[in-house]
Amino acid sequence: MVLTLGLIPANALVAGILVIAAVLFSGKSDLLQDSEGLVEWISEFMITLPGILIFFLPSQMLFLGSTFLAGAISPTPFLERLGLVRWKLPTSTVVLLILATPLAQFFSVLFISLLGLEPSAQLEQLTRVFVETEGSAFALTLILTTLGAGFSEELLFRGYLQRRLLQAWSPSKAIATSALLFALMHLDPVHASGVLFLGVWFSIVAWLTGSVIPAMIAHGLNNLLAILALVLSGKDEDDLASMGPAYFAMIGLGAMFAVLAFLSLRAHRRRLTNQLSFQPSENDNVQQNES
């Protein structure tokens, strides 16, 4: 957990250094003494191809590099330590859990709405990046926020951190801690509040399946759907009133898949219980051998 706690301020530090470097490289050093001008310049820069790279890629590389290093020096086999193993549930159940992710996204949006939180500057900038970028810039944004974020963040928080916590803590405590640190990683209080429920859901998916891979897919799916909602509505994704019928239809499907996943989990657990009840005990084996 120390590694993860250290990466949160390190992520902010790296982002700040890269922004300053970009300002200096562009010959706008005078903006460092003009806070309003600097914010405006950053807002414009972040919707360019170089800006997108600086905005998303460094943190993902930082998370991946640290996680790979920690996994490599662990006495546990690398893939097993990071949760890059096959899931223990039937594939059909895993698919249902992944497809239930829109319901978790809905609760995240609902939570922000109930708190009455206004979109922060960070969320407004993210919205602008998703809505205003086009062509190669938009394609790069899509790749980094779905594949990149899903892989790097889940590998750190659900692969490395949560699996370590589960060795010492109860599942509920490990899941809550992993989700909380995941939310804090986003730095902005409003953004952190919004992703807290999602962090809990990704943690539950990883715990139930025994693998980080389904959580990675669920994370990427959530980000993809959020971006599509923003692009199609052109509005704030954290405002329920701005969402159209298609969004609520997606939530309805997510709820349906959540119910089906729950039923599938119950059926799988019942099958395991029945299999165990039919296995002969050691006393039965001894009696059979004596006879």
Image: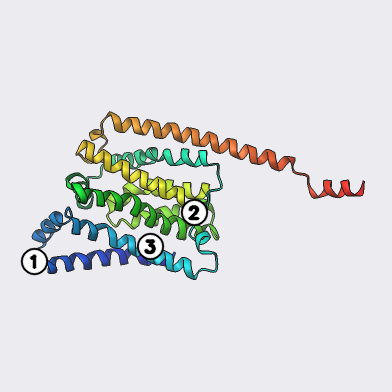
Secondary structure at badge 2 equals helix
Q: Nearer the viewer, mark 3 or mark 2?
A: 3
Mark 3 neighbour density, 10 Å: few (under 14) some (14–19) many (20 or more): some
Label 2 Cα crowd, 10 Å radius (few <14 / some 14-19 / many 20+) = some
Q: How many marks overall? A: 3
Q: Label 3, secondary structure: give it.
A: helix
- Residue to which mark 3 is pinned: 64
Q: Earlier in the sequence, mark 3 or mark 1?
A: 1
Q: Amino acid at mark 3?
A: Leu
Position of 107 relative to 140 (above/below): above
Viewer-closest of 105 and 64: 64
| Horizontal and vertical percent position of residue 214 | 46, 47
Q: How is the image coloured?
A: rainbow
Which residue occupies 13% across, 54% down? 44
- Whether residue 120 is visible here, answered yes or no, is no
Kindly report the distance in space between the C-alpha atoms of the residues bearing marks 2 and 1. Answer: 47 Å
Q: Amino acid at mark 2?
A: Lys
Disc 2: which residue: 173
Q: CA distance from mark 3 to mark 1?
A: 32 Å
Please name the residue that numbered disc 1 is placed on.
28
In the current view of this chain or complex, which residue is farthest to the front? 136
Which percent across, then down, holds residue 169?
53, 58
Q: Are marks 3 and 1 in contact (CB under 8 Å)?
A: no
Indicate left or right for 258 with 291 as reference.
left
Residue 41 in the image: x percent, y percent? 11, 58
Q: Nearer the viewer, residue 123 or 256?
A: 256
Instruction: Point out the frontmost of discs 3 and 1.
Output: 3
* 232 sits left or right of 26 in the view: right
Q: Earlier in the sequence, mark 2 or mark 1?
A: 1
Q: Are marks 2 and 1 in contact (CB under 8 Å)?
A: no
Query: In terms of image quadrants, where is residue 16?
Result: bottom left
